[in-house]
């Protein structure tokens, strides 16, 4: 590939990257995958990613914070959130930093979600409690958090 073709290809790749980044934050892994569909040249992708990182147009830290905020607001728990961040190949240090803001509030958040979905009354029996627990476990909350947040009736 001569210099003119390389500049054209890089320019087209830049436009694609800006189009993707304008919609929402992306992880480096995610952007690499999306740009890989546009070109087979890994050198061009590496060069572009390096420029985007240098110019702070791409940031895994910003992506992790955005994803944490978004998923927390949707009612997703810490287990599922951490798994999702790992799928984007975010480092464990960035995951810890992004989730630190929410670390003290998971049980309280789960209590709010429980009362919003099921009301203030505790479940009438163990079967109803287990149904709630399964629902919140699928949302990514740990069994310890569920036991602390979801009330049990005194009769069972």
Image (cartoon, grey):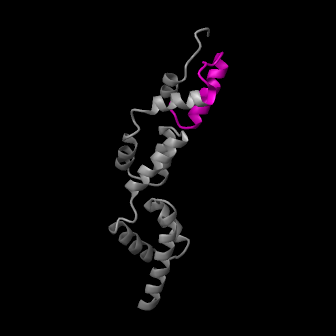
Residue 9 magenta-drawn? no
> Which quarter of the figure has residue 46?
bottom left
Q: In this figure, what is the number of numbered marks?
A: 0
Please state the horizontal and vertical placement of residue 151, each as a whole percent of the image: 55, 19
Q: Residue at x 32, y 68 (%)?
A: 54
Furthest-top residue in this view = 155
Q: Residue at x 64, y 17 (%)?
A: 126
Please state the horizontal and vertical placement of residue 87, each as a whole percent of the image: 49, 52
* Residue 80 against residue 10 in the figure, above or below: above
Please state the horizontal and vertical placement of residue 111, each as a whole percent of the image: 52, 27
Front position in the image: 23 or 90: 23
Q: As drawn, is 55 to the left or to the right of 144?
A: left
* Residue 139 against residue 119 in the figure, above or below: below
Q: Identify the image quadrant of the C terminus.
A: top right
Residue 122 magenta-drawn? yes
Q: Residue at x 51, y 70 (%)?
A: 19
Q: Residue at x 59, y 21 (%)?
A: 120
Front position in the image: 28 or 107: 107
Q: Is residue 28 visible?
A: yes
Magenta part of the chain:
117-142
Q: As drawn, is 142 to the left or to the right of 128?
A: left
Q: Is residue 2 visible?
A: no
* Residue 121 against residue 97 in the figure, above or below: above
Please state the horizontal and vertical placement of residue 117, each as a whole percent of the image: 62, 31
């Amino acid at each position: 590939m001569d210099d003119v073709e390389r500049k054209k290809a890089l320019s087209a790749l830049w436009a694609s990257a800006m189009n993707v980044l304008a919609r929402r934050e992306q992880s480096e892994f995610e952007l690499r995958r999306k740009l890989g569909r546009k070109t087979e040249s890994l050198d061009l992708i590496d060069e572009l990613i390096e420029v985007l990182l240098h110019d702070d147009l791409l940031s895994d830290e910003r992506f992790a914070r955005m994803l944490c905020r978004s998923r927390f607001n949707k009612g997703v728990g810490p287990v599922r959130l951490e798994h999702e961040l790992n799928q984007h190949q975010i480092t464990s240090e960035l995951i810890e930093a992004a989730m630190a803001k929410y670390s003290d509030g998971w049980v309280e958040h789960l209590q709010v979600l429980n009362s919003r979905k099921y009301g203030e009354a505790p479940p009438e029996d163990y079967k109803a409690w287990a149904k709630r627990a399964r629902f919140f476990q699928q949302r990514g909350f740990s069994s310890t958090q569920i036991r602390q947040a979801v009330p049990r009736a005194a009769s069972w």
